[in-house]
Amino acid sequence: MEEKVIWKGRPSQWTNFGTYVLCFLFCWLVIPIFIALWRFLIVKTWKIEITDQRLVEEKGVLSKKTDELELFRVKDIRLDQPFLLRLVGRLSNIILVTSDKTNSIVRIPAIKDGKDIREKLRVAIDERRDKKRVRETDFE
């Protein structure tokens, strides 16, 4: 069965705002210029794809690391809208709490239309759970 892409993109460079400001203030030391460039490349090469079955996150400038999260493993979705991100373009962070052993918390930072993506993700998670006949149960 073919996977349907719900959202594909990368975080905004606004995640590096603090780093860029500090590097600008200390650019006369030269090394901060390379730090800012490296942070830029980290975000530029970070790819996130959400399908109706899983979330695939690819990170890395020189070496690549790919993490996959099956949607039926998502326990909770949280939408954070920090003041600065709201100011600069209605950006938000989506935080997923999962039952995955390697990625118990997955963070999708500084993305546009976070409310819409969160809702699409919620629907896809419910559909995937129904299709796999999986229920989420917490024991305390």
Image (tube, rainbow, N blue to C red):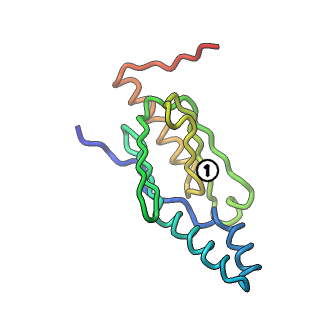
Circle 1 is placed at which residue position? 93
Provide residue 62's location: percent of width, then percent of height: 43, 65
Which residue sits furthest top?
139
Q: The N terminus lies in which quarter of the figure?
A: top left
The vertical placement of 3 against 39, above or below, is above
> What amino acid is at disc 1?
Asn
Please name the residue shown 29% across and 42% down the image.
Answer: 3
- Callout 1: helix, strand or loop? strand
Which residue sits furthest bottom?
28
Provide residue 95's location: percent of width, then percent of height: 59, 42
Q: Quadrant of residue 126?
A: top left
Provide residue 94's location: percent of width, then percent of height: 58, 46
Which residue sits furthest left?
1
Please name the residue shown 51% across and 28% down the image.
Answer: 99
Q: Residues within 10 Å of mark 1 (few under 14, many from 20)?
A: many
Q: The C terminus lies in which quarter of the figure?
A: top right
Q: Nearer the viewer, residue 24 or 78?
A: 24
Provide residue 81's location: percent of width, then percent of height: 68, 51
The vertical placement of 63 against 123, above or below, is below
The vertical placement of 96 against 91, above or below, is above
Horizontal relation, residue 97 to residue 126: left or right: right
The vertical placement of 139 against 39, above or below, is above
Please name the residue shown 44% across and 50% down the image.
Answer: 57
Q: Quadrant of residue 106?
A: top right
Horizontal relation, residue 1 to residue 52: left or right: left
